Image: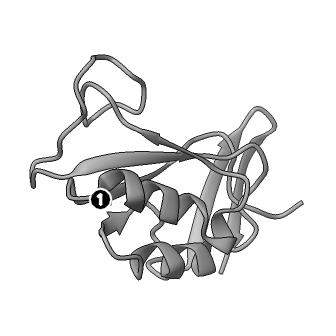
Amino acid sequence: TDGLGPGFPVPVEITPFCHEHTMRTVAALPSCEGCKAVLRMGSSSSNVPDGDEIAVTDNGNYIVDLHFEEPIKDAVKMAEEIKTTVGVVDHGLFCGLTTAVIIAGSDGISVKEA
């Protein structure tokens, strides 16, 4: 099966204003079907909860981690849908920025060309 993940959550930077609405909107996007949107707590540099306060970026925004149980089928579509959502600043899907991906796993190292 080709797809991205689900081993690591996709980070999405959102504005604090109406952040709960933005979280729900992102989670309801067709390309994000099946994700669980979790507001990052504690340090903004870690993707694990390590505090009781909402994690705040250097720009004063919040981070929502999108957790998936299945691989993301269309990362490009997801990137476009997330980026055009009101309240979203940016996301951690870096589509169209490279021509190859190096994948390291228990079965060795492989390269996928674009």
Q: Secondary structure at mark 1?
A: strand
Vertically, is 2 above or below 55?
below
Amino acid at circle 1 = Ile
**In front of the other: 3 or 62:** 62
Report the side of 14 relative to 75 (left or right): left
**In front of the other: 113 or 76:** 76
Vertically, is 103 above or below 44?
below
**Residue occupying image coordinates x 22% and y 25%:** 53
Q: Is residue 18 visible?
A: yes
**In front of the other: 52 or 98:** 52
Q: Dividing the picture into quarters, in which one does residue 28 lie?
A: bottom right
Q: Dividing the picture into quarters, in which one does residue 71 lie?
A: bottom right
Give percent across and percent down for residue 99: 55, 79
Report the side of 96 relative to 39 (left or right): right
Vertically, is 24 above or below 90?
above
Q: Is residue 95 visible?
A: no
- Taking the view exactly as shown, the residue that stands out farthest to the left is 59
> For mark 1, what is the residue?
14
Give percent across and percent down for residue 104: 65, 43
Vertically, is 86 above or below 93?
below
Give percent across and percent down for residue 87: 30, 69
Q: Quadrant of the C terminus?
A: bottom right
Q: Please give the count of numbered marks on the rendered protein.
A: 1
- Taking the view exactly as shown, the residue that stands out farthest to the right is 1
Q: Quadrant of the N terminus?
A: bottom right
